[in-house]
Image: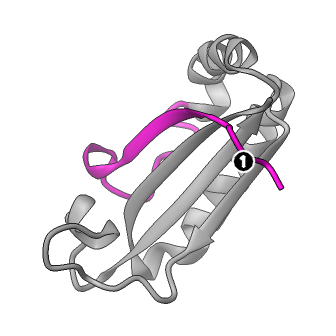
Amino acid sequence: MNYVDGFVAAVPTENKDVYKVHAEKVAIVLKEYGALKLVNCWGDDVPEGKITSFPMAVQCKPDETVVFSWVIWPSREVRNEGMKKVMADPRCQPDQNPMPFDGKRLIYGGFEMIVDE
C-alpha cells in the first residue's frame, strides 16, 4: 500500500499566492523523485480547539491560515530515497524557493496507509 507524508503549517494569509507558487514548484520536484501526488489545502473551516486543534498545534496567529498538505508515495522506501534527493535538489533550497511561512512551526510525519477506499 502507498505511503503518505502529512504536513500542517501556519502561513501568513497575505502569502496565499506566494505559498501556492512555492507548493507548485515543490510538487514538480517531488514527482520527479517518485511521489505520486501532492495535495495542498488552504484552511477554510479550521476551528480553534480548547485542548488540541490544528491552529494550536502550529501556533497559528490571527493573520495566518492553517495549511494541510500531503504527499502520496508508492512506498516508504521510495519516499526515503526520494526525500533525500528532494532535500538536496537546488530547486528546493531556500535561496531558490524560500518557504513563505515559519518552518519551525511546521508539523510533519510519515504514515503507512491502512485503508484506501
84 w.r.t. 105: above or below = above
Residue 115 relative to residue 84: left or right = right
**Residue at left offset 34%, top offset 46%:** 103
Residue 96 belongs to the span the image colors magenta: yes
* Picture layout, residue 6 above or below residue 50: above
Label 1 crowding class (10 Å Cα cut-off): few <14, some 14-19, many 20+? Answer: some
List x then y, in percent, for residue 28: 81, 41
Task: From the viewer's side, name the closer residue of 113 and 44.
Answer: 113
Relative to residue 62, is residue 68 depicted above or below? above
Residue holding disc 1: 25
Q: Nearer the viewer, residue 61 or 51?
A: 51
Give residue 109's position: percent from left, percent from top. 46, 36
Q: Residue at left 66%, top 32%?
A: 91
Q: Which range of residues does the magenta coloring cover?
A: 93-117
Q: In the image, is 115 to the left or to the right of 99? A: right
Q: Specify whether 67 is left or right of 79.
A: left
Q: Position of residue 96 (x, y in %)?
A: 58, 38
- The residue type indicated by label 1 comes to Lys
Q: Please tell me which residue is depicted at 79% across the width and 33% down the height of the picture.
A: 35
Instruction: Kindly indicate the quadrant of the structure image that contains residue 1.
Output: top right
The extreme left residue here reads 51
Q: Residue at x 68, y 10 (%)?
A: 81
Is disc 1 placed on a helix, strand or loop?
helix
Q: Is 58 on the left-hand or right-hand side of 71?
A: left
What is the tally of numbered marks visible in this picture?
1
The percent coordinates of residue 33 (x first, y second) are 80, 23
- Residue 70 in view of the camera: yes
Give yes or no for residue 31 being in the magenta stretch: no
